[in-house]
């Protein structure tokens, strides 16, 4: 049995110094090196006392003048196992005996198994097969078709991924996977274990394969062997059923344009400069006097092509309330159900644009360089552009057709079609801003997105979707 391994203020301080360098390099940690202003180790709770020692270590991290609590799982041993990748190694800390190495416990199979066994309450397999990181979330695949979701950003209250999936499952809705066990401390949902027995094809793959096939064949969209109209229509209806059930169980409320603007401004990405915030807020405020907004309800909050899976008999929704650009404080606020639809519409637009760009780039490489395309190549590009736009429009029409085919959902929506389209345009603008921030903040030197980089993002002409 090992004694408490970090047994002095000097060791704690050395670990803290290592974390400044280690945290920004982790895929689940959604902040750059220069944004981390301070780190406080809140506690170190030992999960396993044999070597390697495993500890649950929540941290308070000051990111851009705002404190957030994140949870880490650390392992300590005299030496780092050969199986642990270099990026998972945190560093060496002094102790009363020999120095110890600290590393990410989830990168070591033995340490990961000890942590999973500790938090899963005996549900499912205790064997960690693999792990996948996304901003503020780590998913651990377990043996025998189970998975553990670790919510890296710790906030008080029920997590929507636990609360909403549980409510929908109680209502008999098969398009969600409720947790079989929840690891909770002092009213904080930290992790959930659920079955993963019906793994399907992620929506992003369904869409990309469809548009790639269309551009490859250069046929009419309806003649595409991988046409997605039927399945996307089913997805739209499933989302409508979810929205109505959430409204019935958790209530709905009226809102106004000014309140909506305040909510959207409050969750603008922190990486924007104040001038950029002011410019985007000005675009939002153009809808501040709108009064035909429909009802506001609890929504998915992170609905996109990455968080839907097509299975044999329908679709499964996941990732409730796991939007890395938001927080649980915002996710628990009622919002227009059209905000969920906007996530998928934005996804269709992005997939079509990326597929088109890839095909055009491939044709340019075949021609041997970026020379000015000739008349025939310009015609081919125009044809491909028309096909990509037609695929997007067809997918959008299918989603909205399926959504509105469920009659009870209409009571949640704005009365006028133009009002529905205006709201969708507003939410798609929000997603475009987030895309711009993600694309411009990958380098370590960009901590404030200047106003010039978002000049083109504004609520212009409302796109007619309805």
Image: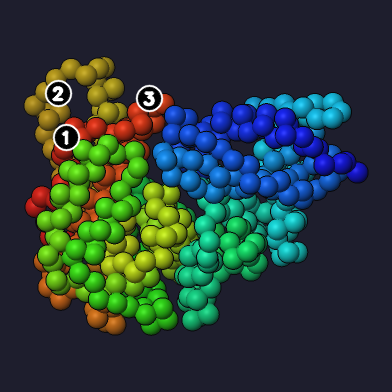
Task: Check contact, mark 2 vs mark 1: CB within 8 A.
Answer: yes
- Give the left or right position of residue 139, taking residue 431 as reference: right
Q: Residues within 10 Å of mark 3 (few under 14, many from 20)?
A: few
Closer to the chain start, of discs 3 and 1, is 1
On the picture, is 341 further left or further right than 298? left
Q: Which residue is mark 3?
A: 445
Disc 2 or 1, which lies upstream in sequence? Answer: 2
Q: Quadrant of residue 87?
A: top right
| Residue 302 image offset from top left, x and y in percent | 40, 57
Mark 3 to mark 1 CA distance (whole Å)? 36 Å
Identify whether 233 is placed above or below 107: below
Is 121 positioned to the left or the right of 203 in the image? right
Residue at 15% of width from left, 61% of height from top?
288
Distance in Å between CA atoms under marks 3 and 2: 36 Å
Residue that label 2 marks: 373
Q: Position of residue 195 (x, y in %)?
A: 62, 64
Residue under the point 15% across and 39% down: 456
What residue sits right under mark 1 in the picture?
381
Quarter holding the N terminus is top right
Q: Earlier in the sequence, mark 3 or mark 2?
A: 2
Q: Is residue 8 above or below residue 66?
A: above
- Up-down relation of residue 58 to residue 80 (above or below): below
- From the viewer's perspective, is the residue at label 3 or at label 1 nearer? 3
CA gap, disc 2 to disc 1?
A: 9 Å
Residue 443: horizontal and vertical position, in percent?
A: 39, 27
């Amino acid at each position: 049995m090992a004694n408490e391994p970090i047994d002095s203020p000097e060791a704690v301080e050395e670990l803290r110094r290592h974390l400044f360098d280690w945290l920004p390099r982790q895929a689940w940690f959604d902040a750059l090196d220069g944004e981390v202003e301070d780190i406080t180790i809140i506690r170190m709770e030992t999960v396993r006392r044999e070597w390697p020692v495993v500890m649950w270590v929540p941290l308070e991290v000051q990111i851009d003048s705002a404190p957030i609590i994140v949870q880490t799982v650390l392992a300590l041993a005299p030496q780092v196992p050969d199986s642990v990748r270099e990026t998972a190694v945190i560093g060496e800390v002094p102790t009363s005996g020999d120095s110890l190495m600290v590393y990410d416990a989830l990168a070591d199979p033995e340490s990961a198994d000890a942590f999973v066994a500790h938090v899963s309450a005996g549900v499912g397999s205790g064997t960690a097969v693999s792990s996948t990181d996304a901003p503020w979330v780590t998913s651990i695949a377990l043996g025998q078709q189970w998975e553990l979701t670790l919510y890296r950003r710790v906030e008080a209250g029920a997590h929507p991924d636990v609360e909403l999936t549980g409510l929908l499952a109680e209502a008999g809705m098969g398009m969600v996977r409720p947790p079989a066990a929840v690891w909770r401390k002092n009213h904080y949902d930290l992790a959930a274990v659920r079955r993963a027995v019906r793994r399907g094809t992620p929506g992003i793959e369904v869409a990309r394969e469809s548009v790639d096939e269309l551009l490859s064949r250069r046929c009419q969209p309806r003649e595409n062997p991988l046409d997605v109209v039927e399945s996307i229509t089913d997805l739209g209806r499933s989302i409508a059923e979810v929205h109505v059930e959430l409204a019935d169980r958790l209530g709905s409320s009226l809102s106004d344009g000014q309140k909506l603007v305040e909510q959207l401004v409050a969750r603008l990405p922190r990486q924007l400069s104040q001038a950029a915030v002011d410019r985007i807020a000005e675009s939002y405020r153009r809808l501040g006097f709108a009064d035909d907004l429909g009802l506001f309800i609890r929504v998915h909050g992170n609905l996109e092509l990455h968080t839907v899976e097509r299975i044999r008999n329908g679709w499964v929704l996941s990732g409730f309330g796991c939007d890395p650009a938001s927080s649980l404080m915002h996710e628990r606020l009622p919002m227009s159900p059209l905000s969920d639809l906007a996530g998928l519409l934005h996804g269709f637009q992005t997939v079509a644009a990326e597929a088109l760009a890839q095909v055009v780039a491939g044709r340019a490489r075949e021609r041997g360089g970026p020379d000015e395309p000739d008349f025939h190549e310009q015609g081919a590009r125009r044809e491909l552009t028309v096909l990509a736009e037609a695929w997007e429009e067809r997918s959008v029409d299918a989603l909205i057709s399926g959504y509105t085919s469920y009659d009870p959902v209409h009571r949640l929506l704005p009365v006028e079609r133009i009002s529905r389209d205006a709201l969708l345009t507003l939410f798609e603008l929000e997603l475009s801003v987030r895309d711009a921030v993600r694309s411009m903040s990958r380098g370590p030197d960009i901590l404030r997105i200047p106003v010039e980089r978002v000049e083109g993002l504004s609520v212009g002409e409302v796109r007619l979707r309805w």
